[in-house]
Image (cartoon, helix red, strand yellow):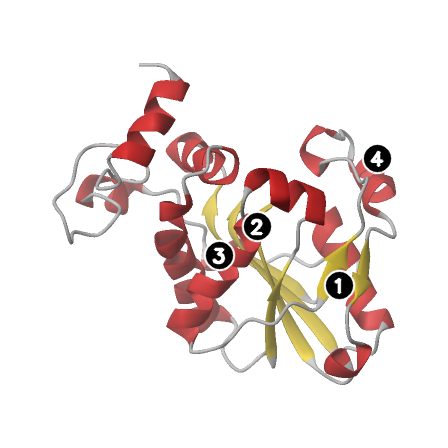
């Protein structure tokens, strides 16, 4: 079965397991029991530091069925995955970062890409995680247009150069003195999260931490 067919099945039959796409009963968890047991969960959130963020934690490793599911969610229009993905992030944040942040936000898409895609995948993750965490996410950053996607940029040095200056703080007064938690879908080199963190720190944030659905090994 081709990837396009698989993605269409997820859109037409939303009661499929997010990861293996087997049919599941209405009202059942979006991950089937088999996938729930074998998900490549990280050890203690795979804590890592960045150039400007204090730490980043990730729920899953970006591989196999997890990678395919995120691609369907991010590029295939399958927004129905957001509640489960948000739940995974929320559980990790509650376990690893509870009490370490004041404001929940996300890494935004630029306006053009959001319009073409129809949604901002990181915003949906933040909003669904926020429901579980009882925190209302706040948009703190805007992304300038014309920045190439990081996924096709290449080496870490090129990623840093590509994303430099890509974001601006919407309201510096809302950031000043605050501890901020940024949500995103994937972390690879950490360049995007570092650039967002730098922008927030320059606007007066006290501290920036990050949480993502998945991380490369």
Horizontally, residue 34 falls left or right of residue 116, namely left
Q: CA distance from mark 1 to mark 4?
A: 18 Å
Against 215, is 9 above or below? above
Mark 2, Cα crowd under 10 Å, few <14 / some 14-19 / many 20+, is: some
Q: CA distance from mark 2 to mark 3?
A: 9 Å
Residue drawn where x is 34% and y is 20% of the image: 5
Q: Earlier in the sequence, mark 1 or mark 2?
A: 2
Q: Which residue is mark 1?
A: 197
Q: Earlier in the sequence, mark 1 or mark 4?
A: 4
Q: Which residue is mark 2?
A: 120
Element marked by disc 2: loop
Q: Which residue is mark 4?
A: 158
Q: Circles 1 and 2: CB distance less than 8 Å?
A: no
Locate residue 50: give its quadrant. Answer: bottom right
Residue drawn where x is 36% and y is 47% of the image: 80
Horizontally, residue 85 falls left or right of residue 58, namely left
Against 94, is 4 above or below? above
Between marks 4 and 3 in the image, the one whose residue lies nearer the viewer: 3
**Does any portion of residue 44 appear in the rendered image?**
yes
Element marked by disc 1: helix
Mark 4, Cα crowd under 10 Å, few <14 / some 14-19 / many 20+, is: few
Residue drawn where x is 53% and y is 82% of the image: 99
Picture disc at residue 125: 3
Between marks 2 and 3 in the image, the one whose residue lies nearer the viewer: 2
**Does any portion of residue 188 appear in the rendered image?**
no
Against 11, is 83 above or below? below
């Amino acid at each position: 079965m081709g990837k396009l067919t698989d993605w269409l099945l997820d859109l037409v039959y939303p009661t499929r397991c997010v990861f293996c796409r087997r049919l599941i009963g209405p009202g059942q968890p979006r991950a089937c029991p088999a996938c729930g047991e074998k998900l490549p969960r990280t050890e203690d959130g795979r804590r890592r530091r960045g150039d400007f963020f204090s730490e980043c934690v990730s729920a899953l490793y970006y591989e196999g069925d997890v990678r395919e599911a995120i691609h369907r969610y991010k590029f295939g229009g399958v927004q129905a995955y957001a509640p489960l993905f948000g739940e995974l992030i929320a559980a990790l944040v509650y376990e690893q970062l509870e009490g370490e942040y004041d404001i929940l936000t996300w890494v935004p898409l630029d306006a053009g890409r959001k319009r073409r895609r129809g949604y901002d995948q990181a915003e949906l993750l933040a909003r669904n995680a926020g429901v579980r965490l009882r925190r209302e996410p706040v948009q703190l950053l805007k992304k300038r247009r014309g920045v190439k996607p990081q996924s096709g940029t290449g080496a870490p040095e090129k990623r840093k150069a590509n994303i430099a200056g890509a974001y601006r703080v919407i309201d510096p007064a809302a950031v000043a003195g605050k501890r901020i938690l940024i949500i995103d879908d994937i972390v690879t080199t950490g360049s995007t999260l570092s650039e967002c963190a730098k922008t927030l720190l320059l606007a007066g944030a006290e501290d920036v931490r990050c949480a993502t659905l998945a991380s490369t090994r």
